[in-house]
Image (tube, rainbow, N blue to C red):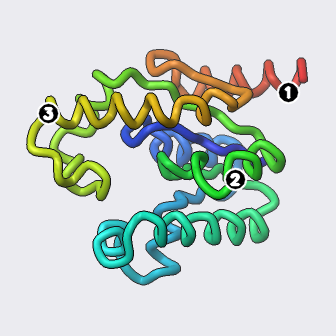
Amino acid sequence: MRLYLIGMPGAGKTTLGRALATFYGVPFIDLDEEIVRREGRSVAAIFSKEGEAYFREREAAALHAVLAQYPKLVLATGGGTPCFHQNLDLLLATGLTLYLAVPVEELVRRLGRAAAARPLLASLPDQQALETRLRETLAARERFYTRAPLQCAAAGCSVENIQRLILHYQTTA
């Protein structure tokens, strides 16, 4: 089993991914953490020194390497991963992709002060600017996210509900 979690920053990909990997007895990989490990520096440092285009290239390379190494896993992607370098096509072709659909208001609540640690959100002056940026980003990314065969709305994204979604999908697909 390969399960890929996609969605906006703050959607819960890492938290749910860890729990799902434990349940299914497979490795858990956070793609951003994998990039940090490979680069030897933080995502923020990569963005600051090299820019987003470089980061997206490293992200695609890390994705390919992880998929070559792990025949079974739960992978938490970065929020932008599905939107660049045909990464979504690769995810859809090699495993089951789940979009964690979380309303912007909830993302703002979840991210709070932690937004300052995220490169694409760090320069925002206040919560209103954060909300505006998240709305714009979601509008640009949603066409990628909604291609996932599985989608879970925020209130229903418990481990148990996701397990039911996966089981239903596997028995009807």
88 left or right, relative to 18:
right
Q: Residue at x 77, y 42 (%)?
A: 92
93 on left or right of 55: right
Q: Quadrant of the C terminus?
A: top right
Q: Whole-Å distance between the Cαs marked 1 and 3? A: 40 Å
2 or 1: tag closer to the N-terminus: 2
Q: Which residue is mark 1?
A: 170
CA distance for labels 2 and 3: 32 Å
Q: On residue 131, which mark appears?
A: none
Q: Residue at x 50, y 42 (%)?
A: 13
Q: Earlier in the sequence, mark 1 or mark 3?
A: 3
Q: Which residue is mark 3?
A: 127
Position of residue 88 measured from the top left corner of the image (x, y, whole percent): 68, 46
Residue 48: quarter of image = bottom left
The type of residue carrying mark 2 is Gln
Q: Earlier in the sequence, mark 2 or mark 3?
A: 2
Q: Pick the residue in front: 76 or 56.
A: 56
Rate crowding at label 1 as few (under 14), some (14 to 19) or many (20 or more) other CA atoms within 10 Å. few
Nearest to the observer: residue 11 or residue 87: 87
Going by the numbered disc 3, the residue's amino acid type is Gln
Q: Residues within 10 Å of mark 3 (few under 14, many from 20)?
A: some
Residue topped by disc 2 = 86
